[in-house]
Amino acid sequence: MSAMNRNALNAYAQISVDGSVATASPHRLITMLFEGALLSIATARGHMQRNEIAAKGAAISKAIAIIDEGLKLSLDMKAGGDLAQKLDALYEYMCLRLLFANLKNDLEPLDEISSLLNDLKSAWVEIDPEKAKAIQISQSTPL
């Protein structure tokens, strides 16, 4: 298994024990990371609305980990060029907004980040998997 598959696999393992992860393509693994982050944010939203502080914090922490340790670390800054740099900055922004949402018990940042992630996921799904490797997935990033 290549380093890129292991990185995405490890990040996804935090959100699911789905048996299809081990056989998923690198392109599909990134899609799964988007899905996991979106699910965690939706879960956090429900906990926030029910004033379940600890569970809300755990769900937001999970979303941040998926973005920071999965999506962000899978960027190939050399091959992805300017687009990878912009995605890196966007992922950093998302993590900061999620921290803000957690600290202030504010739903608006959750909705904002969900919208951004949905847009990125939709675009990602439309990309040819071979082109996607050059934009998002680093084959040289060690585990």
Image (spheres, rainbow, N blue to C red):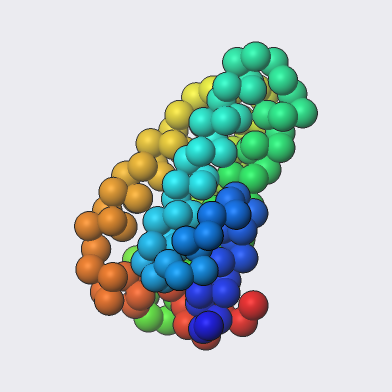
Percent x, y of residue 19? 53, 60
Q: Residue furthest front?
A: 19
Quadrant in the picture for residue 13: bottom right
Asked if 93 appears above or below 131 in the picture, the reply is above
Asked if 43 appears above or below 95 in the picture, the reply is above
| Residue drawn 64% across the image and 22% down it | 47
Q: Is there any visible trace of residue 68 in the rendered image?
A: no
| Residue drawn 51% across the image and 31% down it | 42
Q: Relative to 68, is 80 on the left or the right?
A: left
Asked if 67 appears above or below 54 in the picture, the reply is below
> Residue 99 or 48: which is nearer the viewer?
48
Percent x, y of residue 24? 43, 67
Q: Which residue lies furthest to the right in this view?
A: 54
* Quadrant into which the C terminus falls: bottom right
Quadrant in the picture for residue 40: top right
Q: Residue furthest top?
A: 50
Q: Relative to 57, is 28 on the left or the right?
A: left
Percent x, y of residue 124? 31, 57
Asked if 64 appears above or below 3 in the picture, the reply is above
| Residue drawn 56% across the image and 58% down it | 12
